[in-house]
Image: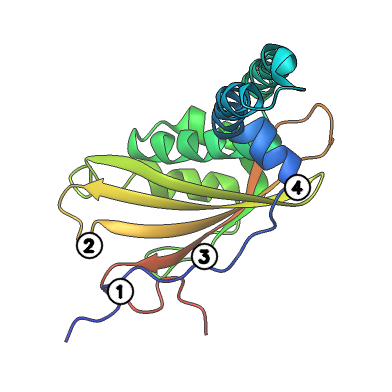
Amino acid sequence: MQQNLIEPSLPPLPQPSAFEHWILEQQLWPAIALTVLGIIAINVLRSIPSAAKHRFTVAGVLVLLAVGVFITGASVVTQRELLQDRSRQLVQSVADRDPQALRAMLDDRCVLQSRFGSATIADRIVELAITRNPGVVASAEVGKVNAGLYGPQVAATQIRVRTEGSMLPSLSWWRVEWQRADADNADWLVSHIEPIWVQGINNPSGSN
């Protein structure tokens, strides 16, 4: 009987500060909230004689804050957002069987732990990715990507992948660990890859 068909609750990753999440990553929502507050302020203050003359000033300040929040968030790419983008590139390089793109994202000592194939060096991981039967994975679509930083040079992402091809099942979640040699300039490189959940497959990582 096939088991493990329902997507699991994933282990939590470190979360960013409220400022980073709401101002730098999800800036649209606080910008909308501030704009709505400005509209409400006009109507509320209009009914208060002593404050009515200030209603447009207050609303204007709130709208300017909304614009400032949106511009700030849109102009800053956080490390979490960068890792999410790198995760999508990683999956695409595997789906495309692009050895150069894939190798450039892997640390030399990257480890792949999976019941479908394991490796302890980057070159072997690239070999496994590009020599598979082409019909097994014809394409891959990345869904949600969770990202968390354990420090300035260590992070992890959880990637939801839907594949098309002869391989069944098609849905899976993968944990990818990242590291970088320099917290300011170096690129994030993959240090560990492991399936968290594969639809219909028990213990996909092959760990004891």
Looking at the picture, which amino acid does disc 4 mark? Ser
Which residue is drawn at the image coordinates 67% and 12% (left, top)? 56
Earlier along the polypeptide chain: callout 4 or callout 2?
4
Amino acid bearing label 1 = Ile
Position of 165 with respect to 63 (left or right) is left
Residue occupied by mark 1: 201
Residue 61 seen in the current view: no
- Above or below 110: residue 41: above
Amino acid type for the residue under numbered disc 3: Gln
Q: Nearer the viewer, mark 4 or mark 2?
A: 4
Which label's residue is closer to the chain start, 3 or 2?
3
> Residue 165's mark?
none
In the foreground, 44 or 146 = 44
Residue that carries the numbered disc 3 in the rendered image: 113
Q: Are marks 1 and 2 in contact (CB under 8 Å)?
A: yes
Q: Looking at this rendering, what residue extends furthest in the front direction?
A: 49
| 50 lies left or right of 105 | right
Q: Which residue is mark 2?
A: 169
- Is residue 51 depicted above or below 135 in this figure? above
Q: Residue at x 75, y 47 (%)?
A: 17
Which badge, 3 or 4, is on the more N-terminal residue?
Answer: 4
Three-letter code for the amino acid on which mark 2 is drawn: Pro
Residue nearest the observer in this picture, 97 or 190: 190
Foreground pick, 135 / 76: 76
- The mark lying in front, picked from 1 and 3, is 1
Q: Nearer the viewer's eye, disc 3 or disc 2?
A: 2
Measure the C-alpha gap from mark 1 to mark 3.
15 Å
How far apart, in angstroms, are the residues tagged by discs 1 and 2? 8 Å
Q: Residues within 10 Å of mark 3 (few under 14, many from 20)?
A: some
Return the residue at label 4: 17
Task: Give the CA separation, mark 1 to mark 4.
Answer: 36 Å
Which mark is first along the chain, 4 or 1? 4
